[in-house]
Image: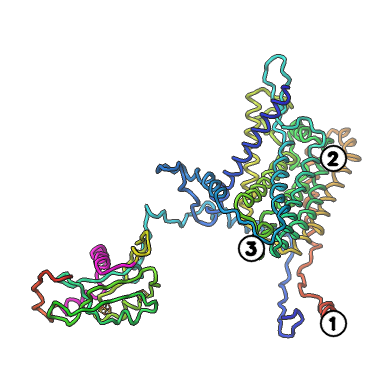
């Protein structure tokens, strides 16, 4: 019974927090984008019917109300059932992701109460697999929506998005494997605790894995420089071209949640979760005060990563589609494998002799990790072609034309 | 056009050097530009609290005004040159015999449809007596279409509003015509 109430409270807090966070992150994004473009951004909307402005904090509410009251136009040529279901699939998939994000464990200090694990599904042994699995359901949302829209731009966007998400899932998984191998568990709590215990975050020991994961999660969340699926200049709106009103909002919020989820994962796997040196302690269970500090540290880290996502959006131009695929298969996947093999070799052959020799293990591992990053990067650099020939294969073109004429 | 068309010129991509292939200079360059602008000065003018500084009000083409002469009468002589020149056909003038001795006609009614106007300034160029001018007011607005059809009174009131900030472009010429007809002094109850 207590478990049910506890879970319900956690779900309520997570959903409420997420929706509020998504709404306000849109405002943050608009402000940051404006600053980068030498503007000021939305700073007018405050409390309705008054002159109070509050730096534009009323904007998300106004946006939400606008979205809800906008006409929801359903074009006549769509496949009704899939058209309606697709945004829901995407939205639900993006929300249930957060069930497995651990915020640490708190001991309330009341006798007879077990320490509360601040996660909706405590002790999920396959936490990381669950998150990767659920987040890839987003492909269905995108593909269903684009197919049901019966619009060529939407379809292009959907196909691009599917290809991109599936391609980048592989480097993403390989980078995660490196972390899982190093910490010896699939439980997110255990991965964080392993980093907190030694005080060495995985980004220090596996910089190559971090790089691959970062790039892959940019691509997974479909943001610039990898927003091929909805590149406005080419595809109108991409897979949500035919959507409007609340359905469009569900798509947009789901995309935002994907970005937030990506940031959470980066922090959990590579940036030490709730751990910060000298501030949060390093045991798995904390009292109320320390637990609050841990949550604050965790959220601050996530916010920093999200800000990086936003700034990156305006820094680097979009990849072309063949470059995007080339990056996934020819660069990121090999780099991820190099990292994975490096970690495996380390654990199997180098850890034991190092423990005997008495050198500081983590320090050596970090040095080796950065060395690996440098060498792998140099190798990728040397192997990259210095120019690409984008001309169509003319013999193929001619043959295609002949075959058409013959018909 | 087919992709093997003879007239297509294919441009060779310039080959990337080692630095370009490493992505590093590009990544660093992109993010430094972004950060510089993130912290840099902002261009936004917080209208309506702040107003745009118009560098040369005399050169700006905002809403129209009908100038008054030294006696406060409308300067227009209803010659229809502006209406003829106007490419948007938005000036409508009804001429009548002038109540004053120094000219033959004057505009009984003078309306400009500001919603049709393209603010090209041709009317101003065409006017032989510099009666119509474009001011630097850029935010005169109304709540209905009817409100945005400015009549003579409205256009003259724009003149009253802006005459101090923006002197008539032909202040010199104006003085000359006034001295040429010194007997235009008697001002009765005539319409302006
Ligand atoms: S500015 Fe141009 S369009 Fe407007 S009234 Fe004058 S001539 Fe016509
Ligand atoms: S050109 Fe000048 S004088 Fe002639 S009708 Fe127009 S405003 Fe009046």
Which mark lies nearer to you, 2 or 3? 3
Please state if B33 lies on the left or on the right of A43 as rendered. right
Q: Nearer the viewer, residue A317 or A363?
A: A317
Residue beneath disc 3: A236
Q: Upstream in the sequence, badge 1 or badge 2?
A: 2
Q: Are marks 1 and 3 in contact (CB under 8 Å)?
A: no
Q: Residue B101: in sight, yes or no?
A: yes
Whole-number angstrom distance, CA of label 1 to CA of label 2: 55 Å
The quadrant holding residue B60 is bottom left
Crowding at label 1, few (<14), some or many (≥20) Cα neighbours within 10 Å?
Answer: few
| Start-end of magenta stretch | B149-177
Secondary structure state at the residue bearing disc 1:
helix
**Percent x, y of residue B15:** 73, 71
Quadrant of the displayed image that contains ligand 1: bottom left
For disc 2, the marked residue is A181
Q: Decide: marks 2, 3 in contact (CB < 8 A)?
A: no
Q: Give the Cα distance between marks 1 and 3.
A: 34 Å
Q: Position of residue A118 (x, y in %)?
A: 70, 29
For mark 1, what is the residue?
A: A402
Q: Nearer the viewer, residue A123 or A250?
A: A250
Q: Residue furthest top?
A: A111
Judged from this view, the residue extending furthest toward the right is A349
* Label 1 close to label 2 by CB (< 8 Å): no
Residue situated in front as seen by the camera: A277 or B49 = B49
């Amino acid at each position: 019974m207590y478990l049910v109430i506890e879970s319900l409270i956690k779900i309520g807090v997570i959903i409420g927090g997420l929706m509020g966070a998504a709404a306000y992150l849109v405002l943050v994004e608009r402000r940051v984008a404006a600053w980068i473009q030498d503007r000021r951004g939305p700073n007018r909307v405050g409390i309705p019917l008054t002159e109070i402005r509050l730096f534009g904090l009323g904007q998300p509410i106004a946006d939400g109300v606008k979205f809800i009251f906008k006409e929801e136009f359903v074009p006549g040529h769509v496949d009704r059932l899939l058209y309606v279901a697709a945004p829901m699939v995407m939205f639900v998939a993006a929300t249930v992701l957060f069930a497995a994000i651990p915020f640490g464990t708190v001991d309330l200090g009341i006798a007879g109460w077990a320490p509360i694990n601040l996660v909706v599904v405590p002790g999920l042994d396959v936490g990381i697999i669950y998150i990767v699995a659920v987040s890839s359901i987003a492909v269905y949302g995108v593909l269903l929506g684009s197919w049901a829209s019966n619009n060529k731009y939407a379809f292009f966007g959907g196909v691009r998005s599917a290809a991109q998400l599936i391609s980048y899932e592989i480097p993403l998984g390989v980078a995660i494997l490196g972390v899982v191998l190093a910490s010896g568990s699939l439980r997110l709590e255990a991965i964080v605790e392993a980093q907190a215990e030694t005080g060495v975050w995985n980004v220090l020991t596996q910089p190559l894995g971090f790089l691959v994961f970062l790039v892959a999660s940019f691509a997974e969340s479909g943001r610039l420089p990898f927003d091929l699926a909805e590149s406005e200049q080419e595809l109108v709106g991409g897979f949500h071209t035919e959507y409007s009103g609340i359905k469009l909002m569900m798509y947009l919020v789901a995309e935002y949640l994907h970005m937030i989820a990506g940031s959470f994962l980066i922090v959990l796997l590579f940036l030490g979760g709730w751990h910060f040196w000298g501030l949060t302690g390093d045991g798995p269970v904390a009292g109320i005060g320390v637990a609050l500090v841990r949550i604050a540290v965790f959220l601050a880290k996530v916010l920093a990563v999200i800000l990086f996502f936003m700034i990156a959006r305006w820094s680097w131009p979009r990849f072309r589609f063949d470059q995007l695929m080339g990056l996934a298969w020819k660069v990121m996947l090999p780099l991820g494998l190099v990292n994975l093999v490096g970690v495996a070799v380390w654990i199997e052959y180098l850890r034991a002799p190092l423990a005997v020799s008495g050198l500081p293990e983590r320090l050596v591992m970090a040095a080796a990790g950065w060395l690996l990053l440098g060498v792998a990067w140099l190798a990728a650099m040397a192997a990259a072609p210095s120019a690409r020939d984008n001309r169509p294969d003319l013999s193929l073109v001619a043959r295609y034309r002949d075959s058409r004429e013959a018909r | 056009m087919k992709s093997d068309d003879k007239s297509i010129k294919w441009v060779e991509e310039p080959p990337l050097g080692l630095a370009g292939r490493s992505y590093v200079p590009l990544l660093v360059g992109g993010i430094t530009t972004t950060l510089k602008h993130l912290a840099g000065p902002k261009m936004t003018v917080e209208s309506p609290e702040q107003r745009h500084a118009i560098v040369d009000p005399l050169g700006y083409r905002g809403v129209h005004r009908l100038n008054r002469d030294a006696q406060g009468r409308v300067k227009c002589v209803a010659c229809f040159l502006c209406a003829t020149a106007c490419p948007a056909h938005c000036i409508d003038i009804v001429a009548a015999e002038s109540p004053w001795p120094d000219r033959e006609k004057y505009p009984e009614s003078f309306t400009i449809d500001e919603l049709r106007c393209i603010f090209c300034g041709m009317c101003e160029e065409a006017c032989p007596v510099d009666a119509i001018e474009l001011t630097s007011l850029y935010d005169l607005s109304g709540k209905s279409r009817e409100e945005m059809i400015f009549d003579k009174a409205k256009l003259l009131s724009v003149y009253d509003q802006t005459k101090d900030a923006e002197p008539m472009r032909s202040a010199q010429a104006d003085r000359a015509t006034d001295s040429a007809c010194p007997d235009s002094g008697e001002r009765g109850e005539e319409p302006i």
